[in-house]
Image: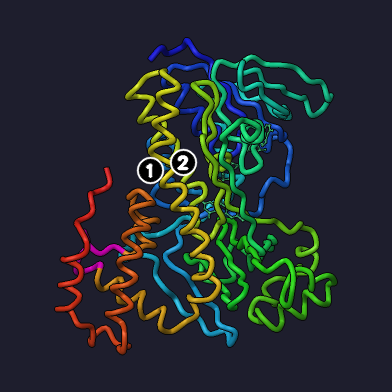
Amino acid sequence: MNPGRDTITLVGAGLNGPLLALGLIRRGFNVQIFERRSDMRRIATSAGRSINLAISTRGIHALSQAGLWSGMQNIINPMKGRMMHALSSELTFQPYGKAEAEVINSISRADLNIVLLNAAEAEGVRISFEQRCTGINLKTGDIQVRDEQSGATRTVNCRVVIGCDGSASVLRNAMLKRVRFNFSQQYLDYGYRELTIPSVGNGEHALETNALHIWPRGNFMLIALPNIDGSFACILFLPFEGADSFAQLSSPSSVMEFFKSNFPDVVSLMPNLTDNFFANPTGSMMTIKCSPWHVEGRCLLLGDAAHAIVPFFGQGINCGFEDCTYFFELLDRYGADWERVFTAFEAVRKINTDAIADLAVENFVEMRDRVADRRFLFRKKVELALEAKYPRLFVPKYAMVTFHRIPYSIAMKRGIVQERMLAELCDGIDRIEDLDWKKADRMIRNELTPLEPDS
Ligand SMILES: Cc1cc2nc3c(=O)[nH]c(=O)nc-3n(C[C@H](O)[C@H](O)[C@H](O)COP(=O)(O)OP(=O)(O)OC[C@H]3O[C@@H](n4cnc5c(N)ncnc54)[C@H](O)[C@@H]3O)c2cc1C
């Protein structure tokens, strides 16, 4: 490695940009970031302020390696499981994992972003806000940067540029014009809107604090994640068109009617429901897959820019932070041989980011529909019982993805085998006591190899 020699330019100071910058500057590189938005620490922006993210093992690992996780305990809210709200208002709690430690952590996107920006700047990363990258010459590394205030544009020559500019990446758009660049973009027919359940006073939560609340309604759902100030950040996922869709909710009365019919226990908890509903735009969700992620040793895509996924496994940023973990491992191994690092990075990550992209789409059906199903809940109990008996052999798919750092592609493959076993073992029974343990033992030992411990 030649610390100090190369200046690395990042586009995007969202979540991945500053974490990547921090690791690079600590390895002796000069790092600058261009960010199109204003600095959220100085000017209130609407950049996903009310959206919360669930941070789990992969994200925690990366944040711990950066020395940030332990200092973040006052801005996270652990969620131990899903609290399902039936139409009758009946509640069912389904734990996420087998132990107290297997929780996912609710954090506001803005709080997380601020921690990362502060940490990167404190170590010397130069972040220029309101500077939009409008294009790149992939042959020279020159990027065009426009000052969002004055409109003035300049050219910045970069030795190495990394696009951390999210799902609508400008760098990826430039790569799209190259020959043999593979690209697919798949929108869901669903959109989402942010809503809020305010605190009931004194920072108290109106619902159970340590849970991710779900109102699964078959074709659509509402979720709520706890904030540290006692409020909940909620997201309504609904088809864009058709019956029970955003297209139908065009007036305050239609919104109120829809909530009264489908989420009756929520209406009294959302005093500003209709104002809230119309204050926010409807977001869209998509899966983006592309390759190659790099142009020689000059330009690389990382995070959502390379692989945007739908949010239903809560893995988008966990996966992006895991990108950083692998990137640093390769940089430490190969030094500033950028082409080698970029090639190896894509080789190790692409198969896994493709897998989590598919798992995330599958999990949407599970969240909005299957979690309300009695048979599904029974299977979840059986999964936990099998895991308790065979902790290295049978780990539920959700746990492999969320509480381990097993490559996503392996979690997906093992998940398929385990699904088949579960279907067979649960067939015709509805009590754990009736489980055929001999059959389970035979299947598990024959078909599953012990999992490598997370390094
Ligand atoms: C509704 C929803 C819920 C989610 N929930 C979860 C969850 O629970 N857990 C989880 O792990 N993930 C979740 N995600 C996914 C997560 O938000 C993303 O994976 C993550 O934000 C990606 O980080 P990033 O840094 O790659 O991109 P971003 O966070 O999008 O950051 C990109 C940055 O680049 C800047 N930028 C863009 N273009 C330019 C340009 N031309 N010039 C300069 N700057 C530019 C943007 O302003 C932005 O700051 C969710 C996403 C959504 C939409």
**Residue at the location (61% across, 25% down)?**
33
Q: Nearer the viewer, mark 1 or mark 2?
A: 2
Quadrant in the picture for the N terminus: top left
Please provide percent x and percent y for residue 261: 70, 84
**Residue beneath label 2, please?**
321
Q: Which residues are magenta?
A: 387-395
Amino acid at circle 1: His
41 relative to 204 in the view: left or right: right
Which residue does the image show at 33% across and 53% down from the upper left?
410
The extreme front residue here reads 179
- The residue pinned by badge 1 equals 61
Give me the C-alpha separation between circle 1 and circle 2.
9 Å
Measuring from the top left, give residue 386's x and y in whole percent: 24, 71
Judged from the image, the quadrant occupied by ligand 1 is top right
Q: Amino acid at mark 2?
A: Phe
The C terminus is located in which quarter? top left
